[in-house]
Image (tube, rainbow, N blue to C red):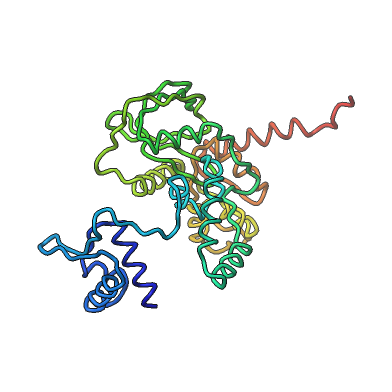
Amino acid sequence: MRSSRLLSILLRLQAQGRVSAAALAEALEVSVRTIYRDIDALSAAGVPVYAEHGRSGGFVLREGYRTALTGLDRPEAESLFLAGVPFAAAQLGMGASLESTRLKLMAALPEALRQDALRVAARFHLDPVAWFQGPEAQQLLPALAEAVWSGRLLSLDYQSWQGRVARQVAPLGLVLKGGLWYLVAAVGPQVRTYRVSAIRSLQIEQQRAEPPADFNLGRYWEAFARDYEARMQAGRARVRARPQALRRLAEASHAMAQAVAGAGPCDADGWHRLEIPIESNEAAVGELLRLGPDVEALAPAELRVALREAAAALHRVYREAPEKS
């Protein structure tokens, strides 16, 4: 246990620079006195660690001192952050570096730990692509990643829902969501999101792109995703549904599942009444038609009319036998 803690202290000092005894104690869940004893043990082992006093003081490694624990080169070290998502590493063009990293780390482990790691790897597989979907073609993704890593401006030819547009953007990060990649980038003072598969071409410029000082990719994406889902399900429809349809409704989305959870009890005819979120009447028609006669839209009136017209159109198609070819 202590050897593991000493290694953790050493790696934290190497990665973070100056770290206080209190911060180390909190991170490692030990007392400050224990941290001081561990620092003494590191010094006795020849590690050049010393204390800097003052309000912003802490423990520091001698400048230039680095451990040689892994022998990883730069691409391998970068790929380490994608060790849990080999699918993403491959699409970013870092698959070979990740495999090289994995082999080096495995070789550095004691035999017993190596066998444990191999057993875990053999029993866990991550597939980030949704059912009935294939991974999107991402030929431009490695070039986008290069621009993100290097912090250089990008000129994009982008196919938006409004048409094809040209944009010069400052890349801020890449996000993998449900098997789909998104580029988060700044256009002037605004931060926008672009679906990578809709980028038709790109050019990496020589000019450096300075990200906003307070930008945090994780916080931005959390807020963006929450706002996007709210906008895509801003409408409401009142429906009645048979019990067998509730489960299928709940599988559509998290918001739909919450609506189903709030459904009232069955009436005398065996129907539940509930209010569900919809993107638009047009989108709701397709969603509700697939449930057949087990769901009936009650409101808004425009949705009932659209469903009736769609059902009539289907009836016209299928009311007669198909023509013989």
Quick check: 219 left or right of 166?
left
Quick check: 272 left or right of 32?
right
Q: Residue at x 22, y 61 (%)?
A: 60
Quick check: 70 left or right of 11?
right
The answer to whether residue 187 is above or below residue 44 is above
Quick check: 57 left or right of 27?
left
Q: Residue at x 51, y 40 (%)?
A: 92
Choose between 264 and 147: the one closer to the eye: 147
Choose between 269 and 88: the one closer to the eye: 88
Instruction: Give the mark count.
Output: 0
Choose between 284 and 195: the one closer to the eye: 195
As drawn, which residue projects farthest toward the right? 324
The answer to whether residue 202 is above or below residue 261 is above
Q: Where is residue 321 in the image (x, y as percent from the top left)?
A: 85, 32
Q: Can residue 298 be seen in this view?
A: no
Q: Which residue is drawn at 86% across and 26% down?
A: 323
State which quadrant residue 20 falls in: bottom left
As drawn, which residue projects farthest toward the left? 54
Q: Where is residue 167 in the image (x, y as percent from the top left)?
A: 39, 23
Q: Position of residue 194 (x, y in %)?
A: 44, 33
Location of the C terminus by quadrant is: top right
Q: Is residue 52 visible?
A: yes
The answer to whether residue 12 is above or below residue 1 is above
Q: Where is residue 151 in the image (x, y as percent from the top left)?
A: 35, 35
Q: Residue at x 59, y 69 (%)?
A: 115
Location of the N terminus by quadrant is: bottom left
Choose between 81 and 223: the one closer to the eye: 81
State which quadrant residue 120 falls in: bottom right
